[in-house]
């Protein structure tokens, strides 16, 4: 079906990336995503800054210790949704609106089931998993409280990622930005009211996050259920279409597994960090929030490249997909490294924003100055992974992440700490594994026929 035969309102808010200047299309799509990530990072950071300054380093360590576990349980489903966006982008680029609708409604059905599963498992398994991770006994009670309150809102978190993946897949990266800005402001206000105003404790930070995330979901749903758009969600059509679910599994499952693999490796890292005590936990968690800003150009260009490549390969425009990929990779690398240099130079002041304890600042600064100058490798790996997903080759980054970012990283840490129980050896695990994965991705990118992934 030709898009010109559709009413103009049917394509409102979408971006067809198969025509026009590839560089301009990628930048215009990436900028709202980057701004969204800034606000996402700001309200994630707000939890830690407010908790660390008003409730102390033990509460900060509790929030920090939960982060990797939250990512592990959420990341599989959000990763699968992100991979499923490839199918949506493909049919949007090919102008097959019937398949587009099936992909969207199947993705929503998957999100509803996934959100319920994560909620039940997350709330129920919290104490056992945190104990397995070796969480400091002084921190454990607050970690359990934070974690359980957070996962009571898991459905909202999963559905927000489902809805934004739909909008991003059809080229609409602006509305997720608007909704996230409102959510970020609401989260910060609620943090200040609950913690600074009412002194409700660490669990209220998770409640604030859940409420603000739910507000974003409502806004997304209002937009996506609006009649007259090619991406409209109709509640009675939300179900699992067998053929489409199999396609979503093909594109999305490897991405979900990839994210879970990274999450599992990070849980192992967190477990080892926990063995160095609450100062190390707080410093590690503070740096993680700072590093989130380095992910801004990485995430936005990886997502932009995935959508750009998927739409153009769906339309059969292979050379255009290649040209856009080269531009996105180079731009992401340069921006990520610039942020890395800034973090390297200003690490003590940045970590000190979360907590002024000298030992907390020491550990956070050590990690920053070990990893920050290698962000260009992280950017390269994520961009190639995004290109692979967009080309229907999601299994490639899954295998690379499983072998390098999980198996090798865990083996390295286990052996290194057995030889010498020094925390800096854990920090070096990241630049080392980023280097290895970048070499493998470079070889694959140059030697493989990735542009025919849908053929």
Image (cartoon, grey):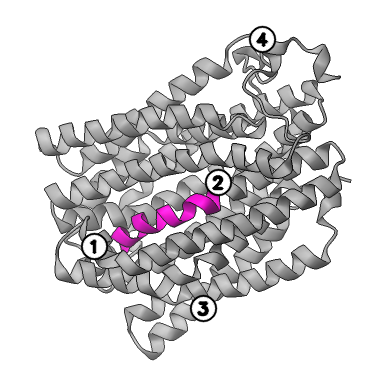
For marks 3 and 1 on the same chain, the one whose residue lies earlier in the sequence: 1
Residue 62: image quadrant is bottom left
Q: Residue at x 63, y 14 (%)?
A: 234
Question: Considering depth in this image, is 197 or 297 the residue closer to the camera?
Answer: 297
Q: Secondary structure at mark 1?
A: helix
**Disc 3 to disc 2, C-alpha distance:** 31 Å
Residue that badge 2 annotates: 300
Q: State whether the magenta stretch is mostly helix, strand or loop.
A: helix
Give how far apart the Cα atoms at labels 3 and 1 are: 33 Å
Question: Residue 246: x and y, percent?
Answer: 75, 38
Image position of 109 (left or right of 375): right
Marks 4 and 3, how far apart at CA = 53 Å
- Mark toward the start of the polypeptide (3 vs 2): 2
**First reached walking from the N terminus: tag 4 or tag 3:** 4
Q: Which residues are magenta?
A: 284-299
Give the residue number, with chain letter if any, for mark 3. 411
Can residue 277 be spotted in the picture? no
Mark 3 residue crowding within 10 angstroms, few (<14) / some (14–19) / many (20+): few
Dots 4 and 3: beta carbons under 8 Å? no
Q: Is residue 305 above or below residue 99?
A: below
Numbered tag placed on residue 349 in the rendering? 1
- Inspect the magenta stretch and tell me whether residue 298 lies in it: yes
Nearer to us of marks 1 and 4 is: 1
User: How far apart, in angstroms, are the residues tagged by discs 1 and 2?
Assistant: 26 Å
Q: Residues within 10 Å of mark 4 (few under 14, many from 20)?
A: some
């Amino acid at each position: 079906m030709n898009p010109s035969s559709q009413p103009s309102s049917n394509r409102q808010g979408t971006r067809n990336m198969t025509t026009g200047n590839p560089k301009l299309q990628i930048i215009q799509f990436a900028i709202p995503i980057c701004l969204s990530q800034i606000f996402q990072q700001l309200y994630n950071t707000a939890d830690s800054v407010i908790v660390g300054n008003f409730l102390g380093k033990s509460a900060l360590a509790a929030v920090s210790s939960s982060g990797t576990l939250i990512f592990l349980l959420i990341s599989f489903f959000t990763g699968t949704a992100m991979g499923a966006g490839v199918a949506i982008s493909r049919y949007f680029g090919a102008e097959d609106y019937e398949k587009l609708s099936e992909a969207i409604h199947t993705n929503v059905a998957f999100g509803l089931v996934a959100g319920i599963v994560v909620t039940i498992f997350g709330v129920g398994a919290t104490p056992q998993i945190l104990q397995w991770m070796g969480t400091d006994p002084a921190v454990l009670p607050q970690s359990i409280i934070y974690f359980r309150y957070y996962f009571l809102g898991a459905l909202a978190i999963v559905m927000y990622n489902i809805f934004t993946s739909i909008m991003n897949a059809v080229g609409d990266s602006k509305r997720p930005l608007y909704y996230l800005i409102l959510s970020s402001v609401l989260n910060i206000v609620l943090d200040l009211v609950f913690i600074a105003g009412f002194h409700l404790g660490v669990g209220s930070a998770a409640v604030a996050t859940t409420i603000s995330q739910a507000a974003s979901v409502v806004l997304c749903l209002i937009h996506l259920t609006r009649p007259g758009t090619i991406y409209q969600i109709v509640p009675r059509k939300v179900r699992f279409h067998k053929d489409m679910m199999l396609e979503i599994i093909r594109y999305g499952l490897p991405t979900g597994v990839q994210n879970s693999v990274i999450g599992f490796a990070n849980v192992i890292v967190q477990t080892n960090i926990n063995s160095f005590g609450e100062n190390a936990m707080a410093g590690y968690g503070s740096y993680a929030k700072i590093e989130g800003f380095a992910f801004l150009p990485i995430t936005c260009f990886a997502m932009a490249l995935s959508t750009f490549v998927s739409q153009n390969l769906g339309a059969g425009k292979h050379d255009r997909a290649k040209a856009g990929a080269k531009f996105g990779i180079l731009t992401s690398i340069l921006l990520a490294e610039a942020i890395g240099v800034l973090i390297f130079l200003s690490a003590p002041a940045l970590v000190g924003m979360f907590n002024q304890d000298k030992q907390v600042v020491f550990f956070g600064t050590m990690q920053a100055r070990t990893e920050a100058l290698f962000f260009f490798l992280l950017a390269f790996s994520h961009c190639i992974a995004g290109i692979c997903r967009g080309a229907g080759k999601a299994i490639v980054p899954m295998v690379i992440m499983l072998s390098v970012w999980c198996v090798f990283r865990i083996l390295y840490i286990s052996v290194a700490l057995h030889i010498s129980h020094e925390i800096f050896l854990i920090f070096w695990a990241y630049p080392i594994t980023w280097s290895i994965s970048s070499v493998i991705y470079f070889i694959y990118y140059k030697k493989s026929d990735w542009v025919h992934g849908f053929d």
